[in-house]
Amino acid sequence: MSKSSIQHKNATSDSSAVRVEGLRHDFGGRTILDIPDWTAHKGEHYLVLGQSGSGKTTLLNILAGLLRPMAGNVSVSDQDIGSLGPGLMDVFRGRHIGIVFQTLHLVSALSVADNLHLARYLAGLPRQVSRVHKMLDNLGLRSLTNARSRALSQGEAQRVAIARAVINEPTVILADEPTSALDDANTTQVMDLLCEQAEACGATLIIATHDRRIKDRFTAVLELGLR
């Protein structure tokens, strides 16, 4: 069984946005995650690197509170998320964690703007038309405000998913394989957008991928090995 490998360079803060202790998760009779101790600092950009089957998506789902680990503790923004029931976890996630899924999960029948309004509604936050319009402006999507998400190109849909992930100014942004299907030019564009939006709201950015093209953009890396 291979262990996770952690690299830190020039960490600037001792305060943590994400803290994992004694994390283990099994599936199908084998251990797919075994992380004794790992911290992602506030405002840090962190890469979780590993091949398919190494547990990257499982880790993000655990950090997002979508999956309970078999063992260990996970804290996000100083909150032990294992202590939250499903309803409280949904509210906490909506307000503190932005997620860009590998499958984007936009609501196809809703407009681009309404997908963002929905993210605020589900987090129990007030409707803010001006904030939604500003976010769409920032990501070059204002002309698509009223377009149905099912009519978007893949690149447009990905930008909307990023806008939805940051509309509530989360403290942590999680992105699962955001560049795996993209060419070099679009990979650079998506990475620039993710980094810019994370910096704009002071969020910790955690990207899980097998795409080694983006490794040089990160000074903090968690490498997961196949088990």
Image (tube, rainbow, N blue to C red):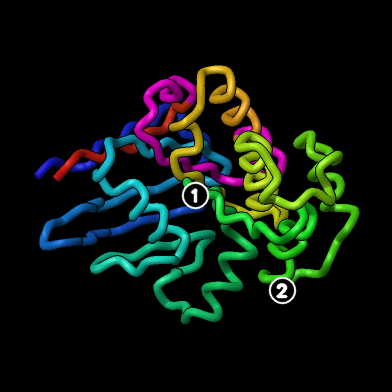
Rendered location of residue 141, percent (x, y): 79, 39
Crowd class of label 2 (few under 14; some 14 to 19; many from 20; radius 10 Å):
some
Point out the frontmost of discs 1 and 2: 1
Rendered location of residue 139, percent (x, y): 75, 36
**Direction from residue 113 to residue 204 in the image, left or right:** left
Point 47% across, 78% down: residue:
84
Sequence order check, earlier mark of 1 and 2: 1
For disc 1, the marked residue is: 103
Q: Does the rendering let one see residue 15?
A: no
The circle drawn on residue 175 is none
Rendered location of residue 198, percent (x, y): 63, 41
Q: Quadrant of residue 202?
A: top right
- Between residue 145 and residue 201, name the one nearer to us: 145
Q: Are marks 1 and 2 in contact (CB under 8 Å)?
A: no
For disc 2, the marked residue is: 124
- Between residue 64 and residue 8, name the one nearer to us: 64
Crowd class of label 1 (few under 14; some 14 to 19; many from 20; radius 10 Å):
few
Instruction: Please count the marks in the image.
Output: 2
Task: Give the SS element for disc 2.
Answer: loop
**Direction from residue 45 to residue 199 in the image, left or right:** right
Amino acid under disc 1: Thr
Q: Which residues are magenta?
A: 195-217
